[in-house]
Image (cartoon, helix red, strand yellow):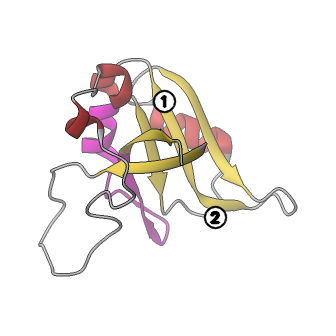
Amino acid sequence: MVMIISTMEPQVSNGPTSNTSNGPSSNNRNCPSPMQTGAATDDSKTNLIVNYLPQNMTQEEFRSLFGSIGEIESCKLVRDKITGQSLGYGFVNYIDPKDAEKAINTLNGLRLQTKTIKATVYFVCFSLL
C-alpha cells in the first residue's frame, strides 16, 4: 500500500498572476482528487497543509494563528526529529469546513517574517500497487 498526500489548489488570487508555478498545479500521481471521484465530502475540506512557515515558529504560535480562525481538531508543526528545528510546514485539521475555507482565504499569502505562507486543502489517497 502506498500513501500519497496531494494538495488541491484553491481558486483565489493573492495578486498579479505570472507564468511561474507555486507548487503542483495538478495531481499527476495517478491518484484521483475528491473532485474527480465525487468523494469530496465536507470532512475532506477540513484538512489543511501549510507551507513556508518561519523556521523559528513554535507549535503554540502555529496553533494560536490558525486557532484564531475557528475551532481546531488537531494541528502539527513538523520538526526535524534530531535537531527539533521546524521544517517550515505543518498540518491543521478544523472541525468545521467553513473555518478551513476561512483560514485559506485569510491566512494564505500572509507574510510572516521573511516568509509568505501557503495554506491549501489536502487529502490522503491510498493506492494499491
User: Can residue 110 be found in the magenta stretch?
Assistant: yes
Q: Nearer the viewer, residue 104 or 54?
A: 104
Q: Position of residue 25 (x, y in %)?
A: 26, 63
> Would residue 70 appear left or right of 42 to someone viewing this image?
right
Which residue is tagged 2? 55
Q: Is residue 116 above or below residue 48?
A: below
> Would residue 4 appear left or right of 102 to someone viewing this image?
right
Q: Is residue 111 above or below residue 75?
A: below
Q: Position of residue 112 (x, y in %)?
A: 46, 61
> Would residue 60 appear left or right of 41 to someone viewing this image?
right
Q: Do labels 1 and 2 touch, CB within 8 Å?
A: no
Nearest-to-viewer mark from 1 and 2: 1
Q: Which residue is located at x 24 percent, y 34 percent?
A: 37
| Residue type indicated by callout 1 | Asn
| Residue type indicated by callout 2 | Gln
Q: Which mark is residue 53?
A: none
Segment colored magenta: 100-120
Q: Nearer the viewer, residue 90 or 43?
A: 43
Q: Is residue 67 above or below residue 117?
A: above
Circle 2 crowding by C-alpha within 10 Å: few under 14, some 14–19, many from 20 = some
Sequence-wise first label, 1 or 2: 2
Q: Which mark is residue 93?
A: 1
Circle 1 crowding by C-alpha within 10 Å: few under 14, some 14–19, many from 20 = many
User: Can residue 64 be found in the magenta stretch?
Assistant: no
> Which residue is outermost to the front?
129
Q: Position of residue 90 (x, y in %)?
A: 56, 48
